[in-house]
């Protein structure tokens, strides 16, 4: 192997790794706040990417309608929850949030979608749609289960993944889609050519890591989110609205997922079920990061991306095997280093 | 109703179904699929529902079972019956290798780890040349007995359901035994079990292997039922589905696995065949509905259908009552009369910069009740944890009967005759009082998993239960013996913990706040019991905040404050000690 090939592989690995890092961060975020291991993270990626790709061809993606449908269900659940004190203000607020918001997004999508819509508008629309889906997903599937065990949440998460992936097939079909690149700029250093797209990937990943780190380390809201993760009851007793924490976590996760999707869909063709595998690779990074550390997750994601790039060059048949068994030595190390502290389970 | 009656009825019904005239062959195929799924789910019941170890990777073990027989029968001409033990062995070995890595993981790492190797193995199955890559292996010979070949679904039906029934029986036998109780205690954390000699890593590995072998059995049957094996049914999706089956049925119940398999397999069939008519030919609609149903079900009935169903059935199964007249297991030797039973010298425990226990020395002699008191955070419970090996000391020595404990694991400390209770009650709430207490007698039995599965452990088991029942009588909870531990008041749960500790037949009993949550009369009864135990030759070291109780009961008192021993003496001396008064009241009163 010569240096050029190695550099190419490394560049490829780092670009993919940056995406895994973004997803890993989102997974860590959601887990830390809600204890949900978010398997449908991959669906946020595909929904974001494929909605963007469809918008780019001037079509209205089915996800916009899904957001409204989920909003209606969420509205029903909200009404059921406040059935004992049905005050007009509360009903109105629930209506505005659950029905008006997704309806406006849907209307905007219909109004703006067209073959000549600027890329920035398409991106904004895709992000809005997926963010709404993320919010309502939490409201419908996870908020009623917030008090249950990690296992129940995990299985519910798998259920959401199955449903959303199936919906993905309905909305986007079995054919893969590609989206237009964010920018056509390029930069050449030595043998390597950096496209604007890959530079955007690096930049956004770093920005998110720093932003999350600042948010959780230095803001009251961030600390409140972490407190919710440690002890829901305790957090509520000191006045933290745990539901709000969950919503914020899901909002951020769906946004991050959609952004990752939009970043990669110009680079590779995405299918309705690609998200699952991409999300799982983010998982591996998140697990290596111990589901708590953002910087470690980011580093791990770069390693996962590089291992993937190199194994697809040397043993392309066994690429997935290698990537997924990468986790085993990490687990061994983690289990050897695991403290013998007992968790109090309820 | 007798415990065996429902099982016999179920067996007869299942045996009769293929002979009912007019049963469509398709139903038999469905029943076969239910049986195959039930086998895997049964392993998951033990692993996840009972043992608390979530695995998304069970489908991969089916793959090991199926591919082992597929390769050996097609490429090497082995007889299918010969490959049965080999299939189970391969699944078992794979489970040992993966289990050593996986089961030590706690909490959410475990399910994530299983997803990862589950997917890794799926890709491995679909890439390996000798496993036929994505196409898999076809032309697997059918099972045959003599000249009778099980070619159609109606004949292999019997092989599958015999496997299901036998596995269910063995699994239930296993759960209702010494090893089974150790497994059932796993989900509640490892400290309580280990304090009574349970080797938790070994128990976890055991259930992991057990579940994998059941999955391997299912895979072996699948290969001979389908007469082909390809990677698809052994992937992540299938692994998720098996867990779903276990949760739907009721993850803690063996029959929940069978029920769950029935519900899910039939539901999927209905969704697959009718949804396209309703919604017009869209593919994958069943996954959407399936996923949504899963979430709804979890929200409505997180414990599954089986317990819900059982609570509504009018029939109640009779419980066995243990025969307390059985001979007692041999007692441990009585301690030498005046020597120190427990000797603590300069014990020290540091957590980072915090010194929780600062060079504390004291001893407990035989036939003595010693109280360890001190304000909150004085290091009392930490001292207990050092003695029982839950924590390792930073310095100093602890010896029992002159033998240095030297940071032995809890399982070894209890063998020296030291038994304890916990400040935060550590019982298994969904086990009965009797079963909880019997965990205390763990080391006094010897039967392993295999002998329990085949009911060869009954003599041993009867002795353990008899001992447990006797200790429950002794602490005065005879009326609650068959109640679930979680249904008792906190005070009563503390007493159950004492009964559990007494099952060890200890020389030294460590009680961490035994009187908390007890009413006045109950405290008096507890004090009387402890005196009686002391007079019977036992020593007691207790942590307690109720000063009236302590002053009345203890022969000697050791006072800790901020990790340091500040006083030691008789209750009368302690009451007037100025340092003690200062520690409790803040200034010399």
Image (cartoon, helix red, strand yellow):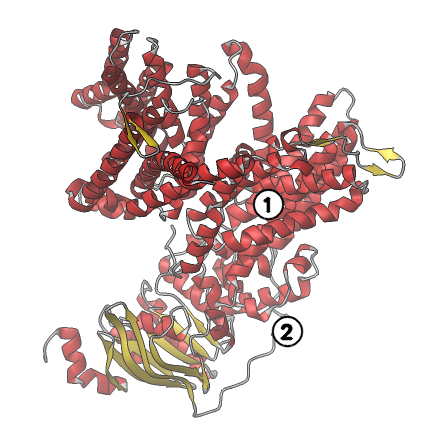
Q: From the viewer's perspective, is B215 left or right of B342?
A: right
Q: Within 10 Å of the Cα at label 2, are there few (<14), some (14-19), or many (20+) other Cα atoms? A: few
Counting residues from the start of the chain, the first of labels 2 and 1 encountered is 1
Q: Residue at x 43, y 65 (%)?
A: B497
Element carrying mark 2: loop
Task: Confirm whether circles 2 and 1 share one chain.
Answer: yes
Q: CA distance from mark 2 to mark 1?
A: 36 Å
In the rendered view of the protein, which quadrant contains the C terminus of chain B? Answer: bottom left
Task: Name which quarter of the figure residue A26 lies in.
Answer: top left
Count of numbered marks: 2
Residue A215, position as x, y percentages in the image: 19, 41
Task: Name which quarter of the figure residue B341 lies in.
Answer: bottom left
**Disc 2: which residue:** B327
Q: From the viewer's perspective, is B336 left or right of A37?
A: right
Say which chain tag 2 marks. Answer: B
Q: Residue at x 55, y 52 (%)?
A: B99
Say which chain tag 1 marks. Answer: B
Residue A314, position as x, y percentages in the image: 52, 39
**Disc 1: which residue:** B43
Q: Is residue B184 visible?
A: yes
The answer to whether residue B284 is above or below residue B227 is above
């Amino acid at each position: 192997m010569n240096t050029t090939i190695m550099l190419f592989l490394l560049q490829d690995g780092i670009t993919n790794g940056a995406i895994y890092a973004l997803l890993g961060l989102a997974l860590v975020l959601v887990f830390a706040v809600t204890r949900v291991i978010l398997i449908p993270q991959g669906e946020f990626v595909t929904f974001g990417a494929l909605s963007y790709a469809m918008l780019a061809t001037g079509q209205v993606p089915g996800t916009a309608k899904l957001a409204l449908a989920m909003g209606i269900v969420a509205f029903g659940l909200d009404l059921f929850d406040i059935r004992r004190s049905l005050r007009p203000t509360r009903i109105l607020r629930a209506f505005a949030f659950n029905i008006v918001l997704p309806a406006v997004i849907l209307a905007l999508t219909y109004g703006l979608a067209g073959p000549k819509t600027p890329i920035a508008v398409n991106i904004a629309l895709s992000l809005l749609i997926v963010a709404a889906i993320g919010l309502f997903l939490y409201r419908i599937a996870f908020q009623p289960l917030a008090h249950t065990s990690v296992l129940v949440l995990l299985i519910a998460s798998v259920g959401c993944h199955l449903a959303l992936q199936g919906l993905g097939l309905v909305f986007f079909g079995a054919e893969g889609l590609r989206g237009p690149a964010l920018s056509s700029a390029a930069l050449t250093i030595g043998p390597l050519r950096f496209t604007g797209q890959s530079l955007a990937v690096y930049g956004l990943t770093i920005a998110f890591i720093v932003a999350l780190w600042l948010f959780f380390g230095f803001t009251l809201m961030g600390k409140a989110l972490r407190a919710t993760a440690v002890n829901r009851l305790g957090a509520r007793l000191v006045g933290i609205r745990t539901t709000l924490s969950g919503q914020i976590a899901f909002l951020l996760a769906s946004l991050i997922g959609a952004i990752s999707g939009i970043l990669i869909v110009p680079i590779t063709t995405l299918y309705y079920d690609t998200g699952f595998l991409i999300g799982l690779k983010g998982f591996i990074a998140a697990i290596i990061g111990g589901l708590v550390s953002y910087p470690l997750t980011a580093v791990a994601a770069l390693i996962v991306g590089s291992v993937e790039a190199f194994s697809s060059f040397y043993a392309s048949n066994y690429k997935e095997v290698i990537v997924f068994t990468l986790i085993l030595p990490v687990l061994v190390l983690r289990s050897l280093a695991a403290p013998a502290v007992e968790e109090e389970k309820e | 109703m007798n415990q065996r009656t429902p099982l016999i009825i179920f067996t007869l019904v299942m045996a009769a179904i293929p002979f009912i005239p007019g049963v469509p062959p398709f139903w038999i195929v469905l029943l076969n699929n239910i049986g195959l799924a039930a086998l895997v789910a049964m392993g998951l019941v033990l692993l996840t529902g009972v043992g608390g170890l979530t695995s998304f990777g069970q489908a991969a073990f089916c793959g090991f079972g199926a591919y082992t027989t597929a390769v050996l029968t097609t490429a090497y001409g082995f007889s299918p019956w010969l490959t049965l033990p080999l299939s189970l062995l391969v699944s078992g070995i794979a489970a040992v290798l993966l289990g050593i890595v996986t089961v030590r993981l706690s909490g959410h790492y475990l399910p994530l780890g299983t997803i990862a190797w589950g997917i890794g193995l799926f890709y491995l199955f679909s890439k390996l040349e000798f496993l036929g890559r994505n196409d898999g292996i076809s032309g697997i010979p059918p099972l045959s007995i003599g000249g009778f070949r099980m070619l159609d679904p109606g004949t292999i039906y019997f092989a599958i359901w015999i496997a299901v029934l036998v596995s269910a029986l063995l699994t239930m036998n296993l759960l209702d035994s010494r090893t089974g109780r150790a497994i059932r205690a796993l989900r509640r954390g490892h400290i309580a079990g280990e304090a009574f000699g349970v080797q938790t890593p070994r128990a976890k590995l055991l259930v992991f292997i057990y579940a994998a072998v059941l999955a391997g059995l299912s895979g072996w049957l699948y290969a001979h039922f389908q007469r082909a094996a390809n990677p698809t049914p052994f992937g992540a999706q299938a692994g998720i589905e098996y867990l779903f089956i276990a949760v739907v049925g009721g993850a803690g119940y063996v029959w929940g696995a069978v029920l769950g398999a029935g519900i899910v397999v039939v539901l999927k069939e209905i969704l697959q065949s009718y949804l396209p008519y309703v919604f017009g030919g869209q593919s994958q609609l069943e996954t959407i509905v399936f996923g949504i149903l899963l979430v709804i079900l979890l929200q409505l009935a997180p414990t599954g259908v089986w317990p819900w169903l059982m609570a509504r059935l009018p029939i109640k199964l009779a419980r066995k009552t243990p025969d307390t007249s059985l001979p007692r297991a041999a007692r441990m030797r009585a301690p030498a009369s005046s020597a120190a039973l427990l000797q603590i010298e300069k014990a020290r425990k540091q957590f980072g910069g915090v010194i929780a226990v600062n060079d504390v020395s004291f001893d407990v002699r035989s036939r003595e009740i010693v109280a360890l008191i001190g304000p909150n955070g004085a290091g009392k419970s930490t001292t207990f944890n050092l003695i029982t090996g839950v924590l390792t000391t930073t310095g100093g020595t602890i010896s029992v009967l002159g033998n240095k404990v030297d940071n032995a694991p809890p399982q070894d400390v209890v063998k020296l005759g030291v038994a304890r209770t916990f400040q935060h009650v550590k019982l298994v709430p969904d086990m009965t009082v009797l079963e909880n207490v019997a965990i205390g007698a763990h080391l006094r039995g010897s039967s392993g998993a295999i002998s329990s599965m085949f009911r060869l452990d009954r003599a041993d088991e009867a002795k353990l239960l008899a001992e447990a029942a006797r200790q429950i009588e002794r602490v005065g909870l005879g009326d609650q013996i068959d109640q679930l531990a979680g249904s008792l008041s906190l005070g009563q749960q503390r007493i159950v913990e004492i009964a559990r500790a007494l099952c060890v037949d200890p020389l030294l009993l460590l009680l961490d706040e035994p009187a908390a949550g007890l009413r006045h009369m109950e405290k008096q009864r507890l004090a009387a019991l402890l005196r009686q135990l002391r007079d019977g030759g036992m020593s007691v070291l207790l942590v307690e905040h109720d000063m009236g109780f302590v002053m009345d009961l203890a022969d000697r008192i050791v006072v800790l404050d901020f990790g340091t021993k500040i006083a030691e003496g008789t209750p009368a001396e302690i009451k007037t000690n100025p340092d003690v008064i200062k520690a409790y009241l803040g200034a010399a009163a």
